[in-house]
Image: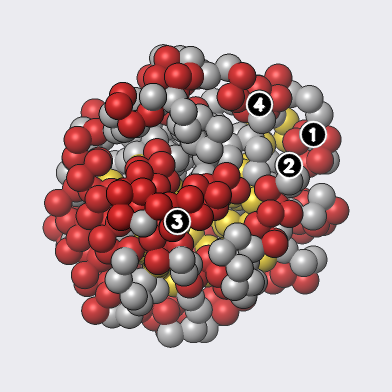
Amino acid sequence: MISLSKLVAGEATVSKHITYEGDSNFIPERLKAFTRSYTPIVVWNVTNRCNLRCLHCYASAGTDRVELSTEQCFEIIDDLAKFKVPLILFSGGEPLLREDIFDIAEYAKKRGIKAVLSTNGTMIDRDIAGNLEIFEYVGVSLDGLKETNDRFRGVERAFEMAFKGLLAASEVVLSGVRFTVTRHNYSEVIPLINLSRENEIPRFCLYHLVPSGRADFGDDISNEERRKLIELLIREAEKEGMEIMTVDNPADGIYTYLKLLEIDPEKAEMARDFLRYRGGDSSGIRLACIDHRGDVHPNQFWWDYTLGNVLVSNFEKIWMGGDGLLEKLRNKVRYLRGKCGRCRFKDVCGGFRLRAYRYGDLWGDDPSCYLYESEIQ
């Protein structure tokens, strides 16, 4: 997760609240400490149930009715608290379908773990919104304007319900838009940012497509389109009032650095220093996933690789137990080859490894890297 606003303008408003706890240093001390450890942020898919049928759902939501009990969730939170996990992102499926989701989030808060909610927003009414203050942040998924979003989500009026939910949530808690870019909605990124700005939504988070679940490479945009899009987002990041972030493509940070280098070398070097802490793919390092069955994975898109199950073994033992894949992910610079292997920025980027794996070689090229050879050599 890379805050383009932080790199370009020096200010990451929402991240400053959630991650850095108000630290005004360009590289917050809390971020430095976090980067020195293998204690991860945990994405927890607490249910596979969903009220939508999204074409690009990485979890293939709605296909599995199994989920952990409230008491089992409390026990897992106790386990995560012992390992000093700083934050849990509650996801799904649709987590608001769990009647106990607020109890679970409140228990996490009592145990010293921050809670963030990832939701499709369609279930948020005034009553639900009143309970959202337990979360540090609520991200609502929107994948285009009305017609495009509803087609993606497989339900009529999905956009209308989600946007109303976003506005209701924003009255009580920091909220933002989560947008997965594909060839079907590429042209609606900026219009949706503009709509969000008009409604004073403080964050827009763009996810690059990761082929998992119901999503595949055929839905992705070209790298030339990706490059143009990130240039547009950099311009948006220069504006006040909204934090612009991207996820699942570390090359975005390098491209931003290169653009800064053309106009402000001093700011560019500050940005590169920040990327040493915040850039790169954190999967299996400082990012973990627990699915609705209690299985642990390197990230939320990697459900075809299971490290262990938190109902069988404690999280620390699973995460620090010497799994071969985790050991390599934590030392990935040694194994990179191809374009990523010869890139001069591999120590602060290294590509998104799961996308490379889906493309055919875990340690080879990230097919979504749009940097030119002249830029990486």
Q: Nearer the viewer, mark 2 or mark 3?
A: 3
Location of the C terminus (image quadrant): top left
* Label 1 with label 2: CB-CB less than 8 Å: yes
Which residue is identified by label 4?
331
Mark 1 is on which residue type? Met
Between the residue at mark 2 and the residue at mark 3, the CA separation in whole angstroms equals: 31 Å
The disc placed on residue 128 is: none
Estimate how packed mark 3 is, as few (under 14), some (14 to 19) or many (20 or more) residues with alpha carbons within 10 Å. few
Percent position of residue 281, x then y: 53, 38
The type of residue carrying mark 4 is: Asn
Which numbered disc, 4 or 1, marks the residue closer to the eye?
4
Q: Residue at x 20, y 60 (%)?
A: 190
Say which label, 4 or 1, has the lower sequence index: 1
Q: Which residue is mark 3?
A: 266
Toward the viewer: 62 or 115? 115
Question: Can you identify the residue that label 1 sits on?
Answer: 320
Which amino acid is tagged 2? Tyr
User: Comparing marks 1 and 2, which lies closer to the viewer?
Assistant: 2
Q: Can you say whether 376 is above or below 188 in the image?
A: above
For this orientation, the residue located farthest to the front is 265
For label 2, the residue is: 38
The tag earlier along the polypeptide, 1 or 3, is 3
What's the colour scheme?
Answer: secondary structure
Which dot, 4 or 2, sits closer to the camera? 4
Q: Amino acid at mark 3?
A: Glu
Q: Secondary structure at mark 4?
A: loop
